[in-house]
Image (cartoon, helix red, strand yellow):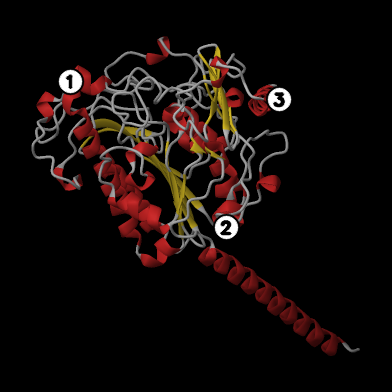
């Protein structure tokens, strides 16, 4: 072959290779684009301090608040009745983001804290500052307040924040960046302290964007310290509306790319207040927020529930039908209703902060692609299970993504979302809580239930209930003689608890 022919052949070869590489790049680009188009968005919404009795769709509470958006979600999607969150807020959030129980992460009580500047003065148009009763109804104000009024709460608190070394849900999205997801956390955080990153903590654990209230609560809903990606500013205005504005803006910025959003309300957590009228779904004009008392606490609680529901509706409406149809929307309560507002069939003293049903049986409602409308599965589901379930919604394989050295307790229930008649992925669910928030500390209270029976330890004493005939735990079977079946079930649960709590 002469030199000119060889030169010509080389040019053809180079052109051919370039065409081939261009074709491959085009195919890859089309594949990624197609994956982004088909990948579902995932919106995870937390309500704060609300058990199943607070929603009309669960048919339990007397005169429940008006919640048009959540009622519609229950009609459009699945409503889980055997769902357990943790007894209090921070532990539930920790189980969702890590898939691990409190005795592994060390998050067993409300917590988190660090220095914050003074909050601005409350604007004249706002609901007045809470009275002592309004601020404290239901408890929880002592935890996670930060230093809004000066001082360092860490002098009184142990390590409360989620360690930055934990493997988290947003990290799983980053590890699968070929799927094209962006991630954001909006609203209440309550997992940070000054030893794990504090204002930067949401970003340190993997979220691309954070905007919200870094602490567990605030002295007023109308003046607060807002943190955006580590920067803090004093803000006025109605906090839930501000968070919804941020959520809408961030989703709009994503265009056609898939996203995962952690959207956490403070509502209906204390301080009790009257939301601005545009948030109402019933008439509350007879309420005088300057004279809040225990006698009308339920009416204010209802108005706060309505405000949360109104803001959820505003966010969902902003998406448009195309985006909404390709979005999984997950709503859960982070723990049961606080004692000051809990309603029958639950009771004060067995509500938020306890491992009784009134403290852990909270709403879980899911809508989205392929989710059967109006379904009410009987599957046992734990808040930790959202960790792997959300991964699988996005097409992420937890077994290939979570590092092998990480022990997680999450069990995906995607099979139930695909078929509400599918067998429960779990034989039992578990919760715990403890003071001190140190990994390895002896847990004060814990509970485990299977399809029918529940074994718990509360204040050092074991109790055993048959939830099939006694769903609100009035009759402790250990006060009498157990039948052979009851004895066998008791021993099974006792052994399972021992095995679980001794696992690494």
The local secondary structure at tag 2 comes to loop
Q: Is residue 75 left or right of residue 429?
A: left
* Number of the front mark, 1 or 3: 3
Q: Residue at x 48, y 24 (%)?
A: 355
Depicted 504 relative to depicted 386: above or below: above
Residue that mark 2 sits on: 419
Q: Position of residue 231 (x, y in %)?
A: 36, 34
For disc 3, the neighbor class at 10 Å (few under 14, some 14 to 19, many from 20) is few
Answer whether residue 205 is visible to the viewer in this image.
no
Q: Residue at x 35, y 17 (%)?
A: 142
The local secondary structure at tag 3 comes to helix
For disc 2, the neighbor class at 10 Å (few under 14, some 14 to 19, many from 20) is some
Please tell me the numbered disc located at residue 288: none
Distance of label 2 from label 3 (alpha carbons): 31 Å
Q: Is residue 504 left or right of residue 175?
A: right
Q: Of the two numbered discs 1 and 3 on the same chain, state the one appearing first in sequence.
A: 1
Q: Position of residue 184 (x, y in %)?
A: 44, 46
Please tell me the numbered disc located at residue 131: 1
Where residue 56 sits, quadrant-wise, is top left
Q: Residue at x 9, y 31 (%)?
A: 288
Residue that mark 3 sits on: 499
Q: Residue at x 81, y 86 (%)?
A: 9
Distance of label 1 from label 3 (alpha carbons): 47 Å
Which sits in the foreground, 112 or 45?
Answer: 45
Depicted 212 relative to depicted 122: above or below: below
Which sits in the foreground, 8 or 147?
Answer: 147
Where residue 13 sits, quadrant-wise, is bottom right
């Amino acid at each position: 072959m002469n030199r000119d022919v060889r030169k010509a052949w080389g040019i053809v070869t180079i052109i051919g290779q370039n065409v081939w590489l261009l074709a491959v790049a085009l195919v890859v680009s089309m594949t990624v684009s197609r994956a982004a188009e088909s990948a579902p968005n995932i919106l995870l919404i937390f309500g704060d301090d609300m058990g199943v009795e607070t929603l009309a769709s669960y048919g339990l509470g007397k005169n429940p608040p008006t919640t048009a958006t959540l009622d519609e979600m229950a009609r459009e999607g699945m409503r889980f009745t055997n769902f357990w969150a943790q007894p209090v807020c921070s532990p539930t959030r920790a189980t969702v983001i890590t898939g691990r129980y409190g005795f592994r992460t060390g998050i067993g009580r409300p917590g988190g804290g660090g220095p914050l500047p003074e909050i601005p003065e409350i604007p004249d148009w706002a609901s007045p500052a809470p009275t002592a009763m309004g601020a404290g109804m239901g408890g929880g104000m002592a935890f996670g307040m930060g230093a809004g009024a000066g001082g360092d709460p860490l002098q009184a608190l142990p390590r409360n924040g989620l360690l930055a070394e934990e493997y988290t849900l947003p990290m799983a999205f980053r590890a699968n960046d070929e799927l094209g997801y962006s991630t954001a956390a909006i609203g209440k955080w309550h997992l940070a302290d000054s030893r794990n990153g504090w204002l930067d903590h949401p970003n340190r654990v993997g979220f691309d964007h954070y905007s919200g209230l870094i602490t567990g609560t605030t002295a007023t809903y109308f003046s607060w310290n807002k943190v955006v990606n580590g920067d803090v500013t004093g803000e006025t205005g109605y906090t839930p509306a501000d968070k919804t504005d941020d959520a809408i803006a961030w989703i709009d910025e994503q265009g056609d790319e898939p996203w995962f959003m952690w959207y956490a309300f403070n509502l209906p957590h204390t301080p009790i207040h009257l939301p601005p009228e545009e948030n109402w779904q019933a008439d509350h004009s007879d309420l005088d927020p300057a004279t809040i008392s225990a006698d009308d606490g339920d009416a204010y609680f209802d108005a706060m529930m309505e405000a949360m529901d109104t803001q959820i509706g505003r966010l969902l409406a902003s998406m448009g039908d195309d985006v909404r149809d390709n979005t999984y929307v997950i709503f859960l309560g982070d723990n049961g209703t606080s004692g000051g507002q809990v309603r029958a069939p639950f009771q004060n003293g067995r509500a938020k902060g306890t491992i009784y049903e009134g403290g852990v049986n909270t709403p879980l409602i899911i809508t989205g692609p392929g989710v059967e409308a109006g379904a009410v599965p009987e599957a046992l589901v734990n808040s930790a299970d959202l960790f792997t379930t959300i991964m699988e919604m996005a097409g992420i394989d937890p077994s290939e993504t979570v590092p092998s050295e990480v022990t997680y307790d999450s069990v995906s229930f995607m099979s139930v979302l695909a078929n509400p008649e599918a067998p429960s992925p779990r034989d039992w669910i578990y919760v715990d809580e403890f003071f001190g928030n140190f990994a390895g500390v002896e847990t004060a209270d814990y509970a485990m239930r299977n399809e029918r029976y529940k074994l718990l330890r509360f204040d050092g004493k074991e109790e055993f209930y048959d939830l099939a005939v006694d769903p609100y735990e009035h009759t402790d079977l250990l006060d009498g003689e157990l039948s052979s079946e009851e004895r066998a079930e008791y021993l099974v649960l006792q052994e399972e608890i021992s095995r679980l709590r001794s696992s690494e």
